[in-house]
Image (cartoon, coloured by chain):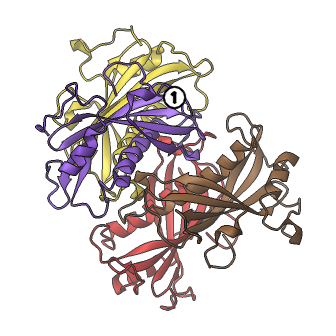
Chain colours: A brown, B purple, C yellow, D red
Amino acid sequence: MPRSCAPGRRPDYPTFYPLQTRWMDSDVYGHINNVVHYSLFDTAVNGWLIERGLLDPRGSQTYGIVVETGCRYYSEIAFPDRVTAGLRVAALGNSSVRYEIGLFRDDDETAAAEGFFVHVYVDRDTHRPVPIDDRRRKAFRGLIPCPDNGLPDTGAGA
Amino acid sequence: MPRSCAPGRRPDYPTFYPLQTRWMDSDVYGHINNVVHYSLFDTAVNGWLIERGLLDPRGSQTYGIVVETGCRYYSEIAFPDRVTAGLRVAALGNSSVRYEIGLFRDDDETAAAEGFFVHVYVDRDTHRPVPIDDRRRKAFRGLIPCPDNGLPDTGAGA
Amino acid sequence: MPRSCAPGRRPDYPTFYPLQTRWMDSDVYGHINNVVHYSLFDTAVNGWLIERGLLDPRGSQTYGIVVETGCRYYSEIAFPDRVTAGLRVAALGNSSVRYEIGLFRDDDETAAAEGFFVHVYVDRDTHRPVPIDDRRRKAFRGLIPCPDNGLPDTGAGA
Amino acid sequence: MPRSCAPGRRPDYPTFYPLQTRWMDSDVYGHINNVVHYSLFDTAVNGWLIERGLLDPRGSQTYGIVVETGCRYYSEIAFPDRVTAGLRVAALGNSSVRYEIGLFRDDDETAAAEGFFVHVYVDRDTHRPVPIDDRRRKAFRGLIPCPDNGLPDTGAGA
């Protein structure tokens, strides 16, 4: 999520992924439970990776494991609202990538929730961090909103 | 699900509801867990009801509670497969309705799983069964595949 | 679930597995959603198998895949109710085992829900059915309530 | 979660809540999915509140809504691991309380994951923030690890 507390808007995100709420996502208060947002983040990120051929969950020799996540909740989402995830890359290290995700309800311009999701790439056999390969790195750069103005692709750090 | 064990096909269902798989639906064997199918049934039935104005989860004075469900699993579904639910009504009693649902993977013509879902309508305050009102009954009849050839709308029984 | 519609009681089950409800299990009606019961069945059956050394989810060369499940719902369960699963084997074939599970709320003697769960054993590589091995078969027989009076261990069929 | 990145230990938490993993919590990589941790946080916090009579989900006129959550993942948890949640209060405002939660696997002394969970108390009818009442405030103070050395109970702010 962004450093400031104001909800983001659709133009803050370079790409989008359509998501669906489920009846059982609603809790006793009638809106989708705070846990469900992470299930939507997870689906948007991994769905985006798989559809671009950047991840084969059962086959890829390297894949991202989740080391940190977070979410701010601004307004309610309730079944059967449609949700659109905005997706961007906020930091790209040697082995790690930080995604930021906004969840937009129906046709809302302002996010109902925003969060982040940090993957560290590891080897399937050793579970040790590995550098992000060039094909993935190129795709991740395409999700950095303004790649020219100094957003961190240090190629260093975890 | 049908009495026979052969998987149903799309023409066996009068209406359809689009569904989405989620990353976390997959279990350790790499396909969506048997529990998830029921979450999809639940979403298709309640989504269909809400979109037709037949259910307001927080407001309706009467609504269906689930008394029995079941599922047969014919073949694997895995994230990010798209799923389409076929929906039909197999029995319509005084207070109860039995839905049958087929889950079709991507563009498959044959169901990957089929199940059923029995709602008994109750009053929000008393939790006692009530007759299905005419507006809902009419809508449910529209989901009976061949309403003329004797499928049970007895208007009696639970 | 049993053939009759009357809820079972604790003495109908030879063994028990403790389960926990979660906050997010509750739906908009304030009780645990019908889908959650299957998550509890799944946990009781696989937990029982793993604790007895009969299943290593990542390693076993053969394991059960779920081919059919069902549940009857008799009364509400709500978080933070404790749940105890009663577990028995109702049929044991060459490759398949049918478990029946009763979910008992807190100290209730009568089941709040009862269901069944059919596993067919397959090979991890071929995904083809294989005979249930002797060690598992012996354990499953221990879950048949009255093994002497003719309950089906035919050693034949799927 | 704490400001530093080192995993916490059991003595960092004043109280504990037992939790259970479920079969379907595991994802395709064989460990519980990152989303599940939040379901455990949610269960520990709300379970602790309900068991102390501080929350009646269907009846309380005021209750906490979740405005922010986060989690750091240090090591794997897999079904059927037992999990114990350590629970503490890290900040207590006029309307808000920030819980920090550590998830300890089996008998491990070091947390497998740590997160936070911020509730803002609102009125059931208006959905507007309300001051935390004295009974809850007193209970929350009991979860502050070192209440004498200046941890923030300002009674001000959200």
Quadrant where the N terminus of chain C is found in the figure: top left
Q: Can you give x and y, in whole percent of width and height, for residue C83 in the image? A: 31, 47
Residue D122 appears at what percent x and percent y? 39, 79
Letter of the chain that mark 1 sits on in the rendering:
C
Spot occupied by residue B25 in the image (x, y as percentages of width and height): 53, 43
| The C terminus of chain C lies in quadrant | top left
Q: Vertically, is D17 above or below C1?
A: below
Q: Quadrant of residue C139?
A: top left
Q: Secondary structure at mark 1?
A: loop
Q: Left of B147 or right of it: where is A144?
A: right
Task: Tell me residue A46's x, y (percent).
Answer: 66, 48
Q: Residue at x 28, y 67 (%)?
A: D58
Depth check: A142 or C65 in front? A142
Of residues A90 and C154, the one drawn nearer to the viewer in this rendering: A90
State left or right for residue D35 relative to residue D50: right
Residue under the point 68% across and 60% down: A87
**Residue D111 appears anywhere in the view:** no
Q: Which residue is mark 1?
A: C55
The quadrant where residue C120 appears: top left
What amino acid type is highlighted by mark number 1? Leu
Relative vertical location of residue D58 with respect to residue B30 in this rendering, above or below: below
Label 1 Cα crowd, 10 Å radius (few <14 / some 14-19 / many 20+):
some
Pick the front one: D92 or C75: C75
